[in-house]
Amino acid sequence: MRSVNDGRLLVAVAAALALVLSTPFVGQIRGAIQEALPGQYRNIVAGSVAAIVTVAGLIAVTRIREDRLWRYGLLAAALAGGVGYGYVTASGNAEVDAVERFHFIEYGVLALLFHRVWKDRGGAASLVFPALSGILVGTLDEAFQWFIPARVGELRDVLLNSAATVSGLAFAVALDVSRRAAGPARSTRRDLACGVAAAIAAVALFVHTVHLGYEVRDATGGVFFSRFSELGLREAAGDRSARWRTEPPVVLRRVSREDQYLAEGLWHVQRRNEAASAHDGWTAWQENQILETWFAPVLDFPSYVNPGGSRWAATDRAAIGAEVDHRPRGQAFVSTANPMPIYTWNRGGFLAVAFLVIGVVVLVGVTPASGRRPR
């Protein structure tokens, strides 16, 4: 039995690593398909998703012969999870939406593989361990994306990955014909507590890395949120001004570490340009003020987004400035350039609370249920 479970674990871990490590190459794969089959990428992905769901449904129908009521109920729950996932992730872009649905399938299959690893444990472990495995992989996937240029990982996506894992687990349990013959539970409270503690630690460190930052005030009174403090922004601006004179970031290298300062500057460039295109001169002007004050190197040097640099020409700046002069004074401005929430919570306090929760979980796990001290 041990060798069988080891083999199943190896398959599940290999699938998880393949999912995470493929992150830098998703764009290249999509581009290759679009180049080889123009206009067919969306149909290929959507067709693959439909085929997988259809085959999975047929397998379920042929395998479920007993306890049909609750097992079909689990299948319905898994399907409802997929529909809800599609609704939440819908962006209006057919290609993006097709990829999101395929992402749901990936985590569903991963949940099925991890369920095969842990199902023989019986009891709560047969459900908790696969779910925790999916949460850990989803968190690692999003954390890895955070360090890949032009990719964004955030807590919302971690939660969506977790929802896909739960739906996949519901399907796996419904499909498991050997469940009735499973032996007694062979996992201790300590095992479960360690798994829960690991998941909490992973999510907490992810939030600390990606979502905690600072509120920065511009000289004109505008407010924006950054993962850098004011001092950190000034230091980063000085460093990039010196470095980009000889090595400007004009090449997008997927297998490289994201320059977070450049990424944040490009957020504000994009928001400024969107506002200017929408004739929202006030927002465009304020975003440009933020850029000129805190992200001047992003304006002055070429990048993989704009080979000519991103600074406004004098005529464009004057035209927007004249438009802003007609707006009422004293209007507060808060930038919405950051694509994911940035919270200004105390970093040390956040980690202290997270580790306190982890400590409580571990303590509950190692304390005997009877209250007696273990031998």
Image: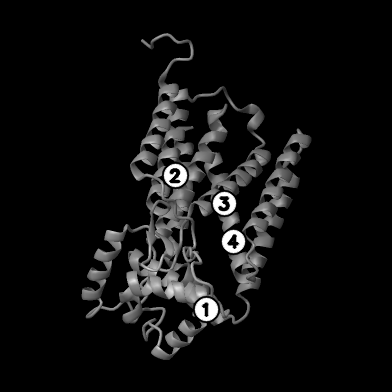
The residue singled out by tag 3 in the image is 160
Report, in whole angstroms, how far the alpha carbon at label 4 lies from the one at label 2: 21 Å
Q: In this rendering, does residue 176 appear at all?
A: yes
In what element is the residue under mark 4?
A: helix
Front position among marks 3 and 1: 1
Q: Which of marks 3 and 4 is nearer the N terminus?
A: 4
The residue singled out by tag 4 in the image is 100
Q: Earlier in the sequence, mark 3 or mark 2?
A: 3
* Amino acid type for the residue under numbered disc 4: Glu
Q: Are marks 4 and 2 in contact (CB under 8 Å)?
A: no
**Crowding near pointer 2: few (<14 within 10 Å), some, many (20+)?**
many
The residue singled out by tag 1 in the image is 281
Please provide percent x and percent y for residue 259.
33, 66
Please provide percent x and percent y for residue 223.
43, 62
Identity of the residue drawn at 48% across and 14% down: 369
Report, in whole angstroms, how far the alpha carbon at label 1 lies from the one at label 2: 39 Å
Front position among marks 1 and 2: 1
Report, in whole angstroms, how far the alpha carbon at label 4 lies from the one at label 1: 34 Å
In which image quadrant can residue 74 be found? top right
The residue singled out by tag 2 in the image is 203
In which image quadrant can residue 146 be found? bottom left
Front position among marks 4 and 2: 2
- Apparent side of residue 194 relative to residue 58 in the rendered image (left or right): left
**Crowding near pointer 1: few (<14 within 10 Å), some, many (20+)?**
many
Give the camera-side residue of 219 and 109.
Answer: 219
Report, in whole angstroms, how far the alpha carbon at label 3 lies from the one at label 1: 36 Å
